[in-house]
Image: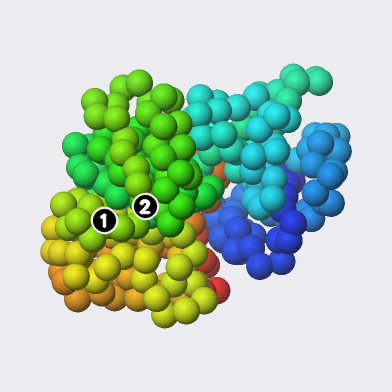
Amino acid sequence: MDVFGLLGNPVGHSLSPPMHEAAYDELGLDARYVTFEPDPDDLGAAIEGARALGIAGLNVTIPFKEAALDRVEPDDLAARIGAVNTLDFSDAGPGDPPTGHNTDAAGVRRAFAHHDVRLADRHAVVVGAGGAARATAFALADAGATLHVANRTADRAEALAADVGRATPSASTAPTAGGLDDLDDRVAAADVVVNATSVGMEEDRSPVPADALHADLAVLDAVYRPLDTRLLREARERGATTVDGAWMLLYQGVEAFERWTGLDAPVDAMNAALRARL
């Protein structure tokens, strides 16, 4: 039996187990997905323990995504983002670190692709400058979008835009950044908007001015509890294409499953299992 799992602290709220277990059941795989909650200071020991136990692959979540980077052999994307969320032990020789990937970026790209949203040559605005925003910004830039990062603290937005610009030499236009003062103008001129903050999770609020939303937009909200946020409702009312946060969550899991198994993921089964718990 193959064992996969999740490293995080806490992990009791995670939706990854039912999503991955649904995939194993759908394909008849002899596999299980379990959660591990090591002390934040014991990440290295946890990864080595997983190797010793023959665990095939691990997802990594808060607070370990950045710290894990120093304990793996990151692929190019994970190295540029500066965080990993998926570890693969299959190619690691004795004593070698596992390969580290960041499937959060793939989750963004594949969520948009599922909704037939083209990213190449589009103008994209990312609201936020934290971990989710970082993966999103690299995903959009790698897909060929022109990027603007907006954040309440402009310095953080500018730092993220600079990192993306340095690490994405293929970009034809350097990313820009700023605070929230001109967000309405930025959104009004955009093709794609992503909320990568937690605004809308605890209160019925939107980080994006409603008057700036328009029918030519594609709007992704990384918040998935609730699924139908105020931002998505207001965007839908104006005729925009809307993508809820569960699609991003789903496709990062799909990407991890496919890397670990080499199989096409049963996306419908995984999606049904995920949404049944939201």
Residue 170: % across, % down = 31, 22
Residue 101: % across, % down = 56, 35
Rendered image quadrant of residue 219: bottom left
Q: Is residue 37 above or below residue 67?
A: below
The three-letter code of the residue at mark 1 reads Asp
Q: Is residue 63 visible?
A: yes
Of residues 245 and 205, which is closer to you in this image? Answer: 205
Query: Mark number for residue 220?
Result: none
Q: Secondary structure at mark 2?
A: loop
Residue name at image x 73 percent, y 61 percent? 10
The three-letter code of the residue at mark 2 reads Gly
Residue 100: % across, % down = 62, 32
Residue name at image x 47 percent, y 49 percent? 129
Q: Which residue is mark 2?
A: 179
Residue at the limit of the structure toward the bottom, as seen here: 204
Residue name at image x 59 percent, y 64 percent? 15
